[in-house]
Amino acid sequence: MTWDEFCTLLAGIMPETPLGQIVQIRSETDREKLKNFTPEQHRVRNEWRSRGLKQVQWTEEEKAKAAQEFQKIIEQAFGATPE
């Protein structure tokens, strides 16, 4: 199945199906409807909205190593170390 075909089929999912209900919860933006969400609906929506917000925390050692690698790249590209 191609991606386009999958997207077409997915777009046709009825809201009465379990998947359709999850999609509806995740995409809801109406504040009045959100006020009436159950705790479980809020959990599903919040998990979906925060999926890309988790940031990686670097240690000081990792930061120093990344800075050294960047300096090497600059030296190779321009023949000088940034100041």
Image (cartoon, rainbow, N blue to C red):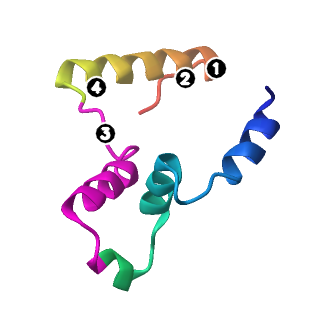
Q: Characterize the local packing of mark 1: few (<14), some (14-19) or many (20 or more) Cα atoms within 10 angstroms.
A: few
Q: Nearer the viewer, mark 2 or mark 4?
A: 4
Image quadrant in which the N terminus is located? top right
- Range of residues picked out in magenta: 35-57
In this view, the residue farthest toward the bottom is 32
CB atoms of marks 3 and 2 within 8 Å: no
Residue depicted at x 37% and y 17% = 68
Task: Tell me the residue that label 2 is attached to.
Answer: 74
Q: CA distance from mark 1 to mark 3?
A: 30 Å
Q: Which residue is mark 4?
A: 63
Front disc: 1 or 3: 3
Comes first in the chain, label 2 or label 4? 4
Disc 4 residue type (three-letter): Lys
The reply to whether dot 4 and dot 1 touch (C-beta < 8 Å) is no
Instruction: Estimate how packed mark 4 is, as few (under 14), some (14 to 19) or many (20 or more) residues with alpha carbons within 10 Å.
Output: few
Q: Which residue is mark 1?
A: 77
* Tag 3 residue: 55
Residue plotted at (70% across, 53% down): 12
Q: Is residue 68 magenta?
A: no
Give the number of the mark in front: 3 or 2. 3
User: In the image, what residue occupies the spot 43% across and 16% down?
Assistant: 69
| Nearest to N terminus: mark 4 or mark 1 | 4
Distance of mark 2 from mark 4, alpha carbons?
17 Å
Nearest the eye: 3 or 37: 37
Relative image position of residue 39 (x, y in whole percent): 19, 62
In 3D space, how far apart are the residues under numbered discs 3 and 2 (Cα atoms)? Answer: 26 Å
Q: Amino acid at mark 3?
A: Gln
Q: Nearer the viewer, mark 3 or mark 4?
A: 3
Element type at mark 4: helix
| Horizontal side of residue 43 vs 28, given as left or right | left
Q: Residue at x 31, y 41 (%)?
A: 54
